Image: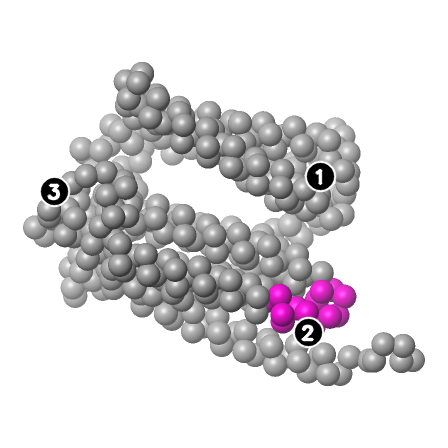
Amino acid sequence: MPPSSSNNDFAIVCYLHILFYFECPQNPSYIGATPDVLDYALTYTGITSFGFPFVILATGGSALIRSDGSPRYSMACMLSGAVINTILDPLLIFQFNMGMAGAALATVLGQAVSGVMALAYLLRFRSVKLQKGDFALSARSCGRIARLGASDFLNQLAMMLVQIVLNNTMTYYGARSLYGKEIPLACAGIISKAGMIFFSIIIGISQGMQPIAGFNYGAKKYRRVMQAYQLGITAASVISVCGFLCFQLFPRQIIALFGSGSDVYFQFAERYFRIYMFATFLNGIQPITSKFFSSIGKAPKGIFLALTRQFLFLLPLILILPLFGGIEGVMFAGPIADTVAALFSLLFIYWEFRRLRLLDQNKPAAGAC
């Protein structure tokens, strides 16, 4: 990694600390919080907003640490915060009777540990040494960083917008069904969390594939580039199929991990889980393919594919299908969006592999003049 790019990465992270702290939304009602949960939401977001700087530092820093040749330390940064959060949650919520405030405080403390660990490493980089002048942003370096990270950024932005629209749609149509507002909203949150755990494994595979594909593409070793993609897509597909089987065979058990509820609650949650997550076995294709195009310098294609599932397909479907099927329509938006996004990704990678094979065939033989 060029020193200027690394330094500007760190500078951008620091500036984002300040931006997110002062621009943190103070009223979560617009994301679909009902009056019954609004006070809890305000308490939780009010406290966790203090952890935003640590989240950005840990997330951005972990990528820099991996690039500096220390993937294990990067993993330790993220895992340590999660473990501390898990341990402190029951202690602060139940032992100290802090309720939602305890859950939020446990989250912030875990984030703080991850952030401090990342910062400690960033101050003793192997590749570069940070100085005061390095915090001056370079337009050229920021542009390169933005192009390479645009697909991930837009994908996360689209996921946030989808969650906001989904929450509001579930409460609106839930109020007009026998389930009421609270049950659909709670189920949407549970499925989002369960999907996030599964999806994080896919993201990890795509991040591991990216430097391998990028390095070999730069070295014009096109066969290895294709092999890297094939290995990544195979691993992601295996995880996706395992996730699909879990979501279809054990939805009640997974839902029960997040708490108990009435028979009506479990009835809706199981049906929602099975339908909305029905095409999970295809979910590894789109993120791996999107990351692949970004890694070989084709950012526009990576950005487009990153937006297909969440923004181009899922978001409109969540708004349109309930007009015809009520709350049931929301359930079918998930598998339709997953399937269409996977088909688009396969089409893009088919044409790219044809191009790479031609480049590999026309590549001068080693030692040829």
Q: Which residue is drawn at 59% across and 75% down?
A: 352
Overall secondary structure of the magenta stretch?
helix
Nearer-the-camera pick, 301 or 1: 1
Residue 281: mark: none
Image quadrant where residue 180 sits: top left
| Residue at numbered disc 3 | 262
Q: Is residue 154 visible?
A: no
Q: Under tag 1, what secondary structure?
A: helix
Q: Residue furthest right?
A: 369
Where residue 134 sits: x, y (%)?
74, 35
> Label 1 to label 3, Cα distance in Å?
53 Å
Q: Which of marks 1 and 2 is nearer the N terminus?
A: 1
Image quadrant where residue 4 sits: top right
Tell me if residue 215 comes above or below residue 114 in the rendering. Answer: below
> Label 3 to label 2, Cα distance in Å?
55 Å
**Label 1 sits on what residue type?**
Asn
| Residue at numbered disc 1 | 7
Q: Earlier in the sequence, mark 3 or mark 2?
A: 2
Q: Under tag 3, what secondary structure?
A: loop
| Residue at numbered disc 2 | 223
Q: Residue at x 43, y 73 (%)?
A: 343
Q: Residue at x 66, y 56 (%)?
A: 211
Q: Is residue 248 left or right of residue 226?
A: left
Q: How crowded is mark 2: few (under 14 residues within 10 Å), some or many (20 or more)?
A: some
**Label 2 sits on what residue type?**
Arg
Q: Are marks 1 and 3 in contact (CB under 8 Å)?
A: no
Q: Earlier in the sequence, mark 1 or mark 3?
A: 1
User: Dividing the image into 4 quarters, which one contains the C terminus?
Assistant: bottom right
